[in-house]
Image (cartoon, rainbow, N blue to C red):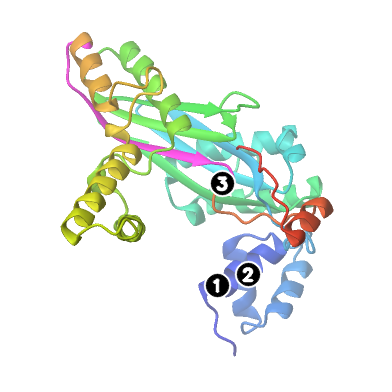
């Protein structure tokens, strides 16, 4: 019996478009044999989209939903932007975002959730793949919640309310007037969509990323040929700049390019007459981190010949 690992379950899911739990059952039923598991899923009508699962789904939509003091965000991928404009696909993303208000960050749990009208989210997704005719995947989800205050959502490049190419949630903890908090949250969300901070504060930046940047800064500083103590100061200066530019609270507000986000929040708190804390934020950009296969012959020829080509901005 072949070993059933998370990687093999993921591969089967990508090849068939079937739900995660169904893929686990299929592999268990067939002793880990990938091809036999595919046939098992086909026999049960769970892999109607076989042959589409090996195509990269890097387009699609990001969906957001807010209910009271809870907000959720999901990314559902498709192969083309054409499908992202399909009403059936948009309804699916909209409904899944609503369901994520309860399930939170766990995509597997979200896949098992009951979908409006019958079946689970995973089963509905499989059915959509077969009827729409493109590979699709529920990639990720997140939820934010505050005890008191607001969670504000924003979508950039929106194709419909709550659906777009970039989605942002901002959680503001405060007892201030909700109208004022909503306005502040919307401005902060628009800033986050544009500036793409990597963490809330400099201390929360990923340690591996910081070390990588430090290594790059060190190599650059060494090339100057200056003494070691000067090189160290150059590195520290570069790292201070990196933290400032990539941590949300120290970024310059895109609206005026001179006021730090922390100061924007402090000023609004003073206006509202109550403390305001930016508790957390989430930013999903469609397809980030997915290597999309290029079926553009001209692009392949250009790459092979070393000719540069500008990439579109997301």
Residue nearer the viewer, 45 or 61 = 61
Whether 275 is among the magenta residues is: yes
Task: Determine the CA span between mark 3 and mark 2.
Answer: 24 Å
Q: Is residue 283 magenta?
A: yes
Of the pair 233 and 294, the residue shown nearer to us? 233
Q: Report the mark closest to the observer, 3 or 2.
A: 2
Dot 2 and dot 1 residues touching (CB under 8 Å): yes
Q: Regarding mark 2 in the picture, which secondary structure is present there? A: helix
Give the answer, above or below, for where 124 lies relative to 29: above
- Left or right? Give the position of 233 relative to 113: left
Residue at figure coordinates x 52%, y 72% from the top left: 6
The residue at the point 32 percent across, 32 percent down is: 251
Q: Position of residue 97 (x, y in %)?
A: 53, 37
Quadrant of the frame with the C terminus: top right
Pointer 3 and pointer 2: residues touching (CB < 8 Å)? no
* Res 158 → quadrant: top right
Q: Which residues are magenta?
A: 272-287
Q: Position of residue 239 (x, y in %)?
A: 27, 48
Residue 7: mark: 1
Residue 210 appears in the picture as rendered: yes
Query: Mark number for residue 11?
Result: 2
- Residue 109 is left or right of residue 125, and the answer is left
Quarter location, residue 17: bottom right
Lower sequence index among marks 3 and 2: 2
The quadrant in which residue 95 appears is top right
Label 3: how many Cα within 10 Å (few below 14, some 14–19, many 20+): some
- Which mark is drawn over residue 114? 3
Can residue 120 be seen in the rendering of this structure? no
Relative vertical location of residue 259 with respect to residue 123 in this rendering, above or below: above
The dominant secondary structure in magenta is strand
């Amino acid at each position: 019996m072949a070993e059933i690992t998370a990687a093999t379950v993921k591969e089967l899911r990508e090849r068939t478009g079937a739900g995660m739990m169904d893929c686990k059952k299929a592999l268990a039923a067939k002793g880990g044999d990938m091809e036999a598991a595919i046939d098992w899923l086909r026999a049960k009508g769970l892999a109607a989209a076989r042959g589409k699962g090996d195509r990269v789904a890097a387009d699609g939509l990001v969906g957001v939903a807010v209910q009271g003091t809870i907000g959720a965000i999901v990314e559902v991928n498709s192969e083309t932007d054409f499908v992202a404009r399909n009403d059936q696909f948009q309804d699916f993303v909209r409904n899944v975002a609503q369901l994520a208000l309860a399930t939170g960050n766990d995509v597997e749990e979200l896949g098992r959730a009951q979908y409006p009208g019958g079946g689970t989210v995973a089963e509905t997704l499989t059915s959509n793949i077969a009827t729409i005719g493109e590979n699709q995947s529920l990639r990720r989800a997140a939820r934010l919640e505050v005890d008191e205050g607001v969670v504000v959502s924003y979508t950039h490049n929106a194709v419909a309310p709550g659906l777009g190419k970039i989605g942002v949630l901002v959680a503001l903890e405060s007892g201030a007037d909700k109208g004022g908090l909503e306005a502040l949250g919307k401005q902060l969300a628009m800033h986050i969509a544009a500036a793409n901070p990597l963490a809330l504060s400099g201390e929360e930046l990923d340690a591996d990323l910081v070390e990588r940047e430090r290594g790059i800064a060190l190599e650059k500083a060494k090339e100057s040929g200056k003494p070691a103590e000067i090189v160290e100061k150059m590195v520290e200066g570069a790292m201070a700049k990196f933290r400032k530019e990539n941590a949300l609270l120290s970024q310059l507000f895109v609206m005026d390019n001179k006021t730090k986000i922390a100061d924007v929040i402090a000023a609004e708190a003073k206006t509202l007459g109550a403390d305001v804390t930016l508790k957390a934020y989430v930013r999903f950009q469609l397809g980030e981190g997915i290597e999309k296969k290029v079926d553009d012959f001209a692009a392949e020829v250009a790459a092979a010949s070393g000719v540069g080509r500008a990439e579109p901005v997301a």
